[in-house]
Protein backbone atom coordinates (compact mmCIF):
# COMPACT_ATOMS: atom_id res chain seq x y z
CA UNK A 1 0.00 0.00 0.00
CA UNK A 2 1.24 3.48 -0.89
CA UNK A 3 0.20 6.73 0.76
CA UNK A 4 -0.13 9.92 -1.30
CA UNK A 5 -0.55 13.14 0.67
CA UNK A 6 -1.94 16.19 -1.12
CA UNK A 7 -2.64 19.68 0.21
CA UNK A 8 -6.34 19.84 -0.49
CA UNK A 9 -8.65 17.14 0.86
CA UNK A 10 -10.99 18.03 -2.06
CA UNK A 11 -8.48 16.54 -4.54
CA UNK A 12 -8.31 13.13 -2.86
CA UNK A 13 -11.30 11.48 -4.54
CA UNK A 14 -10.18 12.31 -8.07
CA UNK A 15 -6.59 11.26 -7.44
CA UNK A 16 -7.71 8.03 -5.70
CA UNK A 17 -9.73 7.05 -8.76
CA UNK A 18 -6.70 7.57 -11.00
CA UNK A 19 -4.23 5.69 -8.79
CA UNK A 20 -6.52 2.81 -7.89
CA UNK A 21 -6.74 0.35 -5.03
CA UNK A 22 -3.06 0.13 -4.06
CA UNK A 23 -3.05 3.72 -2.86
CA UNK A 24 -4.45 5.71 0.03
CA UNK A 25 -4.80 9.41 -0.86
CA UNK A 26 -5.27 11.91 1.97
CA UNK A 27 -5.17 15.69 2.30
CA UNK A 28 -3.21 17.55 4.96
CA UNK A 29 -5.32 20.72 4.73
CA UNK A 30 -2.44 22.96 3.64
CA UNK A 31 -0.13 24.51 6.21
CA UNK A 32 -0.63 22.31 9.26
CA UNK A 33 2.39 23.59 11.20
CA UNK A 34 2.58 27.15 12.49
CA UNK A 35 5.14 29.26 14.25
CA UNK A 36 4.78 28.69 17.97
CA UNK A 37 4.06 31.72 20.10
CA UNK A 38 5.49 31.45 23.55
CA UNK A 39 8.09 32.22 26.15
CA UNK A 40 11.05 30.67 24.33
CA UNK A 41 11.16 32.90 21.32
CA UNK A 42 9.84 35.97 19.66
CA UNK A 43 6.60 34.86 18.01
CA UNK A 44 8.04 31.40 17.49
CA UNK A 45 11.36 32.79 16.30
CA UNK A 46 14.54 32.67 18.39
CA UNK A 47 16.24 35.84 17.17
CA UNK A 48 19.34 35.22 19.33
CA UNK A 49 19.78 31.79 17.73
CA UNK A 50 20.06 32.83 14.08
CA UNK A 51 16.27 33.35 13.79
CA UNK A 52 15.59 29.65 14.45
CA UNK A 53 11.85 28.94 14.14
CA UNK A 54 9.86 26.72 16.47
CA UNK A 55 6.76 25.14 14.95
CA UNK A 56 3.70 23.50 16.43
CA UNK A 57 0.77 21.69 14.82
CA UNK A 58 -2.19 23.91 13.97
CA UNK A 59 -5.09 22.62 16.10
CA UNK A 60 -7.52 23.43 13.28
CA UNK A 61 -5.73 20.89 11.04
CA UNK A 62 -5.41 18.11 13.65
CA UNK A 63 -8.13 15.94 12.06
CA UNK A 64 -6.17 15.77 8.78
CA UNK A 65 -2.88 14.91 10.49
CA UNK A 66 -4.60 12.30 12.66
CA UNK A 67 -5.99 10.59 9.54
CA UNK A 68 -2.53 10.55 7.93
CA UNK A 69 -0.85 9.05 11.01
CA UNK A 70 -3.66 6.49 11.35
CA UNK A 71 -3.34 5.49 7.68
CA UNK A 72 0.40 4.91 8.11
CA UNK A 73 -0.25 2.76 11.17
CA UNK A 74 -3.35 0.89 9.98
CA UNK A 75 -2.01 0.08 6.52
CA UNK A 76 1.53 -0.60 7.76
CA UNK A 77 2.86 1.93 5.26
CA UNK A 78 6.63 2.05 5.10
CA UNK A 79 8.50 5.38 4.71
CA UNK A 80 9.53 4.49 1.16
CA UNK A 81 5.84 4.14 0.22
CA UNK A 82 4.88 7.70 1.21
CA UNK A 83 4.56 10.29 -1.56
CA UNK A 84 4.12 13.96 -0.75
CA UNK A 85 2.16 15.72 -3.50
CA UNK A 86 1.80 19.28 -2.28
CA UNK A 87 1.61 22.23 -4.67
CA UNK A 88 4.62 22.96 -6.86
CA UNK A 89 5.57 26.29 -5.27
CA UNK A 90 7.60 27.38 -2.26
CA UNK A 91 4.63 27.09 0.10
CA UNK A 92 3.93 23.56 -1.12
CA UNK A 93 7.60 22.76 -0.68
CA UNK A 94 7.49 23.99 2.93
CA UNK A 95 4.37 21.90 3.60
CA UNK A 96 6.16 18.87 2.11
CA UNK A 97 9.15 19.53 4.37
CA UNK A 98 6.88 19.79 7.42
CA UNK A 99 5.11 16.56 6.44
CA UNK A 100 8.42 14.74 6.02
CA UNK A 101 9.60 15.90 9.42
CA UNK A 102 6.27 15.19 11.10
CA UNK A 103 6.20 11.65 9.69
CA UNK A 104 9.87 11.06 10.64
CA UNK A 105 10.97 10.90 7.01
CA UNK A 106 14.35 12.32 6.10
CA UNK A 107 13.44 15.37 3.96
CA UNK A 108 16.53 14.72 1.81
CA UNK A 109 15.06 11.39 0.70
CA UNK A 110 11.29 11.89 0.97
CA UNK A 111 9.43 11.23 -2.26
CA UNK A 112 7.91 14.39 -3.72
CA UNK A 113 5.27 14.26 -6.43
CA UNK A 114 4.55 17.33 -8.54
CA UNK A 115 1.76 17.60 -11.07
CA UNK A 116 0.04 20.57 -12.64
CA UNK A 117 -3.33 19.04 -13.42
CA UNK A 118 -5.38 16.20 -12.05
CA UNK A 119 -5.32 14.01 -15.13
CA UNK A 120 -4.33 10.38 -15.41
CA UNK A 121 -1.18 11.05 -17.48
CA UNK A 122 0.05 13.78 -15.08
CA UNK A 123 -0.61 11.78 -11.90
CA UNK A 124 0.89 8.55 -13.23
CA UNK A 125 3.95 10.38 -14.54
CA UNK A 126 4.44 12.12 -11.17
CA UNK A 127 4.23 8.94 -9.11
CA UNK A 128 6.53 7.07 -11.52
CA UNK A 129 9.25 9.69 -11.23
CA UNK A 130 9.15 11.39 -7.82
CA UNK A 131 11.60 14.17 -7.02
CA UNK A 132 13.12 15.31 -3.76
CA UNK A 133 12.14 18.21 -1.53
CA UNK A 134 13.87 21.38 -2.72
CA UNK A 135 15.51 22.81 0.40
CA UNK A 136 16.14 26.20 -1.26
CA UNK A 137 12.39 26.61 -1.80
CA UNK A 138 11.73 25.48 1.78
CA UNK A 139 14.21 28.05 3.09
CA UNK A 140 12.56 30.73 0.96
CA UNK A 141 9.12 29.94 2.36
CA UNK A 142 10.39 29.80 5.95
CA UNK A 143 12.28 33.10 5.55
CA UNK A 144 9.15 34.80 4.28
CA UNK A 145 7.01 33.36 7.07
CA UNK A 146 9.52 34.36 9.76
CA UNK A 147 10.01 37.85 8.33
CA UNK A 148 6.26 38.41 7.99
CA UNK A 149 5.68 37.37 11.58
CA UNK A 150 8.50 39.36 13.18
CA UNK A 151 8.05 42.51 11.09
CA UNK A 152 4.25 42.32 11.06
CA UNK A 153 3.85 42.00 14.80
CA UNK A 154 6.35 44.76 15.52
CA UNK A 155 5.14 47.33 12.98
CA UNK A 156 1.37 46.75 13.14
CA UNK A 157 0.98 48.44 16.57
CA UNK A 158 2.76 51.51 15.17
CA UNK A 159 0.28 51.59 12.29
CA UNK A 160 -2.59 51.33 14.76
CA UNK A 161 -1.33 54.32 16.74
CA UNK A 162 -0.44 56.44 13.72
CA UNK A 163 -3.14 55.59 11.18
CA UNK A 164 -5.90 53.43 12.66
CA UNK A 165 -6.85 50.10 14.19
CA UNK A 166 -7.13 46.99 12.08
CA UNK A 167 -4.16 47.64 9.80
CA UNK A 168 -1.54 44.98 9.35
CA UNK A 169 2.10 45.20 8.26
CA UNK A 170 2.44 41.44 7.90
CA UNK A 171 0.47 38.78 6.10
CA UNK A 172 0.38 36.33 9.02
CA UNK A 173 -1.71 38.43 11.39
Image (cartoon, rainbow, N blue to C red):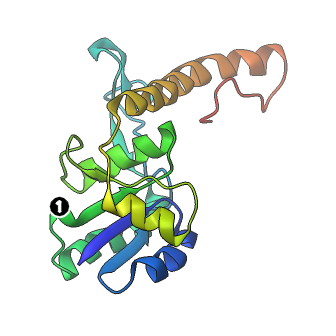
Q: Is residue 34 visible?
A: no
For label 1, count other residues whose C-alpha is less than 10 Å away and answer few (under 14), some (14-19) or many (20+).
few
User: Toward which corner of the image does residue 28 lie, by quadrant?
Assistant: bottom left
Residue pushed farthest bottom?
A: 21
Measured as percent of width and height from the top left, residue 23 is found at 32, 78
The residue drawn where x is 76% and y is 22% is: 160
User: Looking at the picture, how far across and down is residue 5, in whole percent?
Assistant: 38, 64
Q: Position of residue 66 (x, y in %)?
A: 34, 70
Where does residue 64 sit, x and y in percent of width and height? 42, 68
Left or right placement of residue 49 versus residue 165 in this view = left
Instruction: Find the residue positioned furthest to the right.
Output: 163
Q: Circle 1 sits on which residue?
A: 80
Q: Residue at x 41, y 61 (%)?
A: 125
In this image, 68 relative to 149: left or right? left
Please tell me which residue is depicted at 84% across the width and 17% down the height of the picture.
163
The number of discs equals: 1
Q: Is residue 154 left or right of residue 133?
A: right
Point out the image quarter for the N terminus: bottom left
Q: Is residue 14 visible?
A: yes
| Front residue of 4 and 116 | 116
Name the residue: 38% across, 25% down: 45
Q: Name the quarter where the C terminus is drawn.
A: top right
Quarter of the view holding residue 71: bottom left
Secondary structure category for the residue under label 1: helix
Amino acid sequence: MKLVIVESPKKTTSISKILGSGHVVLGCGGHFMELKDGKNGFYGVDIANNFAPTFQPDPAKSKFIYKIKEAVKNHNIKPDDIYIATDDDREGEAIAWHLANYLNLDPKYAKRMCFHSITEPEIKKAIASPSKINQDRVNSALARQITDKVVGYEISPILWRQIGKGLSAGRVQ
